[in-house]
Image (cartoon, helix red, strand yellow):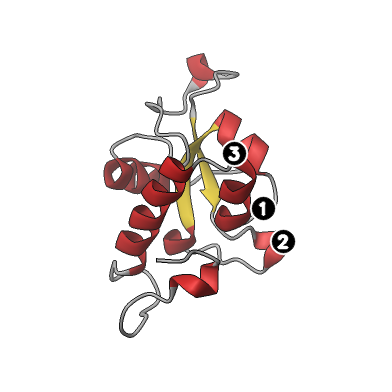
Amino acid sequence: MGSQSPSHVRTLGRRQGWLCFYCNCRLIKPGRNNYGRNNIATIDHRTPLCRGGSGELWNKCLACAECNSRKGALTVEEYLSVVGEPAKLLMMKKAIEAQVRDRRAPPEEGPIDWDRYGWAV
């Protein structure tokens, strides 16, 4: 786990209700006594930095250590297609749509083009 800005962890935790972005498990805040726990909150880059993703807050989410480790250098879309659970895809689609519309995310004109992400509406 790399360096995590405490303010980013708090902001993302409040935004996500301290739930994992991928599996929806309850997250625990990072701390000395929580090392090695699978449900510890870790910052994940939805589009990994090694794949051209941004280090800005709009490209980050909180994930449990287990999901973050499994996702590795995959994008959100790639990871969810590997996981292959339609309920998660729907949940993620709604979460991404809400965050893209957030003022901190880059503006996108009109309705989101889900075909661009490989998701038919």
Secondary structure at badge 1 equals loop
Q: CA distance from mark 1 to mark 3?
A: 10 Å
Question: Residue 46, image x and y in percent?
Answer: 54, 56
Earlier-in-chain disc, 2 versus 3: 2
Question: Residue 119, image x and y in percent?
Answer: 49, 64
Between circles 1 and 3, the one closer to the viewer is 1
Residue 110's tag is: none
Q: Please tell me how crowded label 3 is: few (under 14), some (14-19), or many (20+) other residues with Cα within 10 Å.
A: many
Residue 50's tag is: 2
Which residue is drawn at the image coordinates 39% and 59% (left, top)?
A: 96
Residue 74's tag is: 1
Instruction: Looking at the picture, tell me which residue is in the foreground, 8 or 22.
Output: 22
Between circles 1 and 2, the one closer to the viewer is 1
- Report the amino acid beneath label 2: Cys
Image quarter where the C terminus lies is: bottom left
Residue 109 is left or right of residue 118, and the answer is left
Earlier-in-chain disc, 1 versus 3: 3
Secondary structure at badge 3 equals helix
Read off the residue under disc 3.
68
Above or below, 32 relative to 19: above
Number of numbered markers: 3
Instruction: Looking at the picture, tell me which residue is in the foreground, 94 or 9.
Output: 94
